[in-house]
Image (cartoon, helix red, strand yellow):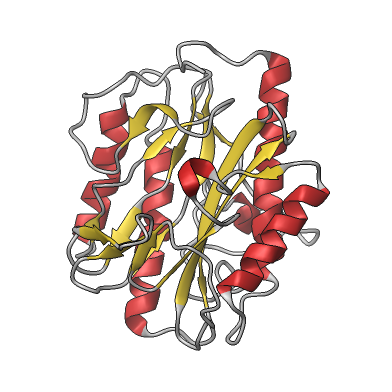
Amino acid sequence: MSQNNRLSKRELEQMRASSRLAARTLEMVSEHIQPGITTNAIDRMVDTFIRDYGAYPSPLNYRGFPKSVCTSINEVVCHGIPEDRVLKDGDIINVDVTCTLPAKNGFFGDTSVTFYVGEPSPDAIYVTEVARQALEVGIAAVRPGARVGDIGYAIQTFVRSKGCSVVREFTGHGIGKEFHTEPSIPHYGIPGTGPLIKRGMTFTIEPMVNLGSWETLVLDDDWTAVTKDGSLSAQFEHTLLATRSGVEVLTRRDSLLKHSEDKPYARLGRRSVPAAHAPQKDGANAAGG
């Protein structure tokens, strides 16, 4: 689907439904993140949950990818393949969920979060929270009339100011009736350059932030990307809709994710984690950041 063609009202509702399911899948996963669980177990949970709602786990068999979800631990930047590896205390893991709803000829919803397994190290907290904030900064740059380069510039400037680096080999992307479409959304760039952001465009922002160098390597499985220097990496992702006044986060969640957004040190933005700032019955906010 070309991003030059805006979704119809009916198509947009289908896109919202798929994105909500992807968000709910991460909520489900968050209940099970703990030392001792395997990434294969996470994969089975995701596969079952998505299929139970009449959807399809989009990564499965996509260009040969063998599993239903991507699980990327510690130095793995993205596209980690679930296996019998056991999560250990102190690990960080990004779980990247994409679903197609309905399963045949449906729309795609794509979102990811980095979780803490047990008690994280100061370095793990630092890179994860920089990545979390980087997504917030990127979303804040989305508005009709801006350009894709403005998003990347905002993210890159913020991440550099924190002493970390932004991965360049992997980017956000257009999404809708297809998993990956134009435009590509780099998380670095020059302001005022790149495609114009137009009302009705749907795309992902998904900055991958490394504690060390931005350079990566792809392992022999042709999927798993790791930091070249072995440093920790973290990522957060939302599917977005450019609106008349700014942006709608299609994969927003109704509650805080356990083992990620419920931590006292989690830096929760109003755009990327609206549940943290929703009014409570007593008038207080759920969290700040």
Q: Residue at x 60, y 16 (%)?
A: 7
Residue 87 at x, y percent in the picture: 53, 82
Left or right of 5 on screen, residue 207: left
Q: Quadrant of residue 198?
A: top left
Q: Residue at x 21, y 48 (%)?
A: 157
Q: Quadrant of residue 37?
A: bottom right
Residue 10 at x, y percent in the picture: 73, 17
Q: In the image shown, does 103 or 146 lie closer to the viewer?
A: 103
Q: In the image shown, does 109 or 282 lie closer to the viewer?
A: 109
Q: In the image shown, does 280 or 18 lie closer to the viewer?
A: 18
Left or right of 36 on screen, residue 197: left
Q: Quadrant of residue 227?
A: bottom left
Left or right of 171 on screen, residue 34: right
Residue 43 at x, y percent in the picture: 63, 64
Residue 261 at x, y percent in the picture: 57, 66
Q: Is residue 120 above or below residue 103?
A: below
Q: Number of labelled discs?
A: 0
Q: Is residue 223 above or below residue 153?
A: below
Q: Is residue 256 visible?
A: no
Q: Residue at x 34, y 55 (%)?
A: 222
Q: Is residue 90 visible?
A: yes
Q: Residue at x 17, y 33 (%)?
A: 190
Left or right of 252 on screen, residue 152: left
